Amino acid sequence: MKIMKFGGTSVGKPERMHQVAQLITKDDEQKIVVLSALSGTTNALVGIGDALSKNDKEAAKQQIEKLQAHYNNFIKELVKQPASLEKAKAIIAEHFEFLNIILKISFNEALNKDILAQGELLSTKLFCVYLEEQGIAHHLLPALDFMSIDSNDEPQIGSIKVKLAQILKQHATTPLFVTQGYICRNARGEVDNLKRGGSDYSASLIAAAATATACEIWTDIDGMHNNDPRVVKKTLPIEQLSFDEAAELAYFGAKILHPASIWPAQHYNIPVKLLNTMQPDAKGTLIVEEAATKGVKAIAAKDGIIAIKVKSSRMLLAYGFLRKIFEVFEKYRTPIDMITTSEVAVSLTIDSNMHLAEILKELEPFGTVEAEDNQAIISIVGNELATTENLLSRLFDALKPVPVRMVSYGGSPHNVSILIPADQKTTTLQLLNKGLFNLD
Ligand code: ASP
Ligand code: MG
């Protein structure tokens, strides 16, 4: 069993969907194909939810109509036979009728999740109409029948495994399954999701649950690159990464993969391949247990970082101080990304300002508290960095003109992170591309 996940741009145009159908029928291995919503759809659905949350029904209605028109155009090119077109029209009508009913009832968060789920439901159902027209045997697996999260929003891998196995057993001879990424049920049994970009996570969870031979993530770029192609001119795809390296890169800003999607594959030791739908023969990136080589592999940047510093002479020789500080972040469910300490101060970073005011207030009793937003974390990721010759000297040579505010080294053998003002990000990524990879 192999898992193949296709992102929004890979299914965003009728001709791309046709190409996906070709890619999934290239070999005979049994497959579960996981699809995202067509590109732009989830953003549009977020917009509709936002308008409704502000009770702006007129704006929501307009956005629904615009989206429906997009789908009605899409199917004209997707299928040819009148009977298929009718089926596709009926699917669109059903889902947009649902959105129009929501317009009439009072909005709440659970309903918002239902709205967000329409994208993946539409893409998978329409794709199946095309497969049927092409005579490609398949079965649509509703993700809501097996994908679930608990009350902490964590996927319930045990239950996913049991449920998926039961369903697959009923269709043992089916060569091809199609399912939705992103959507799931929560602990209350309501429709929920795995957060933005969550289809990768779905694919990895399904790969783990089905002990797949591989989890292929198909996007519009030929694998993970050594630097951000939107910021620096020359970047190169990375052939092989270890799970640990890939997790650091995904977490610290490489947009190609949802950060949580590494752990299920890693835990069940399932190779992950990042491949390009537009260039299916390109090597892409293979993510496995072992790193191929030693040394620096890539640089990634994460914006929107807030630095918080707590300074207190009471910290001197005290124990339990850090625990008390961490408890504040735990209370507000705010993850800490980076941390550095001196004997009298601790600096740390977070990437959400959702509870910033409360956090700062609760930190006040511990000392002088300073917060600064508009920071960026630059992560240098690789294998056995500590024993890589001259790494630190090359790194700091390249960083000479940059006002580095924090440095985190030694937390893992795979990562050195620095904190800089966000307006220095472009320059820093360029300087490091030259200094560490000798690329412009
Ligand atoms: N459609 C969802 C999103 O745009 C999930 C995904 O594509 O991975 O975030
Ligand atoms: Mg994505």
Image (cartoon, rainbow, N blue to C red):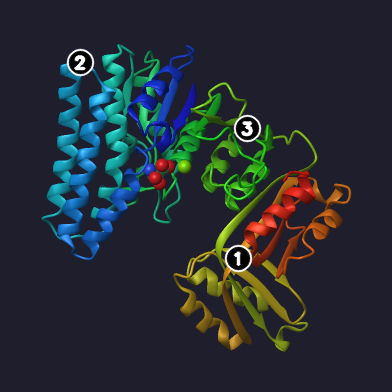
Picture residue at 31% right of the left edge, 31% below the top? 124
On screen, residue 223 above or below 103: above
| Circles 1 and 3 in contact, beta carbons < 8 Å | no
Hey, what amino acid is under mark 2? Answer: Gln
Percent position of residue 66, x then y: 21, 45
Q: Which residue is mark 2?
A: 81
| Front residue of 166 and 286 | 286
Q: CA distance from mark 3 to mark 2?
A: 38 Å
CA distance separating discs 1 and 3: 30 Å
Indicate which disc, 1 or 2, sits on the residue closer to the N terminus.
2
Q: Residue at x 26, y 22 (%)?
A: 129
Q: Position of residue 91 (x, y in %)?
A: 19, 31
Q: Is residue 270 above or below residue 29?
A: below
Query: Label 1: how many residues lie within 10 Å, few (<14), some (14-19) or many (20+)?
Result: few
Q: Mark 1: which amino acid?
A: Asp
Mark on residue 101? none
Residue 156, horizontal then vertical, whole percent: 44, 44
Q: Which residue is mark 1?
A: 423
Q: Look at the numbered disc 2 and give the secondary structure of its residue.
A: loop
Quadrant of the image occupied by residue 9: top left
Q: Is residue 190 visible?
A: no
Badge 3 is on which residue? 285
Where is 435 relative to 243, above or below? Answer: below
Judging depth in this view, the residue of 138 and 274 nearest the camera is: 274
